[in-house]
Amino acid sequence: MAVSQSRARSWGDLLLMRRLPRARQKHLQAVDFARAWQMLRYPSVLLPGLYLAVSLGYGSIIFVLSGPALFSSLYGFQPHQIGLLVGLSLTLGNLAGELFAGRFCDWVSEVRALRRGGRRRAEDRLVAILPGAVLTPVGLVVEGVCVQRRTHWVGPAVGIGVASVGFQVVTTVVFTYTAECYKPQTPHTATILNFLRDTFGFCVAFYDLQMGAALGFQLAWILLALVNVAFFLPVLLLFWRGEHWRERLGEPDFDGDL
């Protein structure tokens, strides 16, 4: 019955969230506010969550924070020009990454499952994160080198765009992977992922420009790119051990319904 009702709804109903099936009733309890934090005990949430946070900081937010100071002093840009350079680079990069990441992630999962005789592993999706793991630090380094050497403004714009493509790939794969690992707890894993990345992104403003001024933006951005790579290395462990760790820890004893 639920399937037939879902098919009967038009795309407009789905878009506007009309005629949705009524969720089962559940009384909100104080412990419900702590459920997201409980997901931090699972490596399949914690490790990709930390990597996602660093990727957001060094693949997107750092450009928004440092752009006004850098491009006004280097190129004499006005606020609207800075907004266009940073905003368009990030938007186009994110759009390209989003169009590529979803299909690529599903394709990798499907191909690896077929090679295994149809058995799926959530960790197969982590293979699709590799382009993002490369593009995010590369884009950051490109911008740092171009700023340090005062190249044409196209150089930093390309670096920002490349990094944002990589960040969007990382975002798509991490959210998809954690949701596949713990489907009933998806609302809680999404909450903790957003908390981790927003908290890390908030901290970037306290040191990005100061670090660049002290070390030079080329060296500073290279060091931050290496930090991004360092946080990616534990994610690689999940490819080999993630399924074992999930079996050892067991499933959470709660779901995401409220």
Image (cartoon, rainbow, N blue to C red):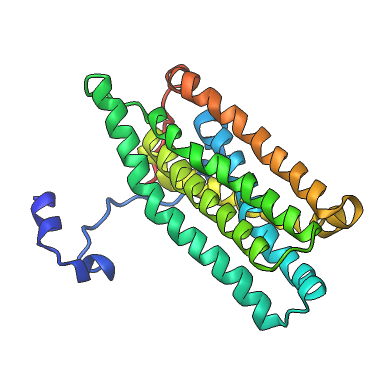
Depth check: give the residue in front, 39 or 139. Answer: 139
Task: Give the residue drawn at x 62%, y 69%.
Answer: 86
Would residue 243 be found to the left or right of residue 18 on screen? right
Height in image: 138 above or below 151? Answer: above
Q: Depth check: 63 or 142 in front?
A: 142
> Can I make out residue 199 in this image?
no
At 66% from the left and 41% from the top, the residue drawn is: 228
Left/right placement of residue 152 relative to residue 170 reads right
Give the quadrant of residue 201: bottom right
> Residue 159 lies in what quarter of the image?
bottom right
Residue 69 point in image, percent of width and height: 79, 70
- Viewer-closest of 9 and 90: 90
Question: Where in the figure is residue 47, as x and y percent of width and height?
Answer: 58, 33
The reply, left or right, for residue 168 in relation to residue 147 is left
- Asked whether residue 179 is in view, the answer is yes
Count of all numbered marks drawn on residues in the image: 0
The percent position of residue 48, horizontal first and vertical second, equals: 54, 37
Q: Is residue 42 above or below residue 87?
A: above
Residue at 37% from the left image edge and 36% from the top image edge: 180
* Residue sitting at the far right: 214
User: Residue 234: where, in percent of width, then height?
Assistant: 60, 28
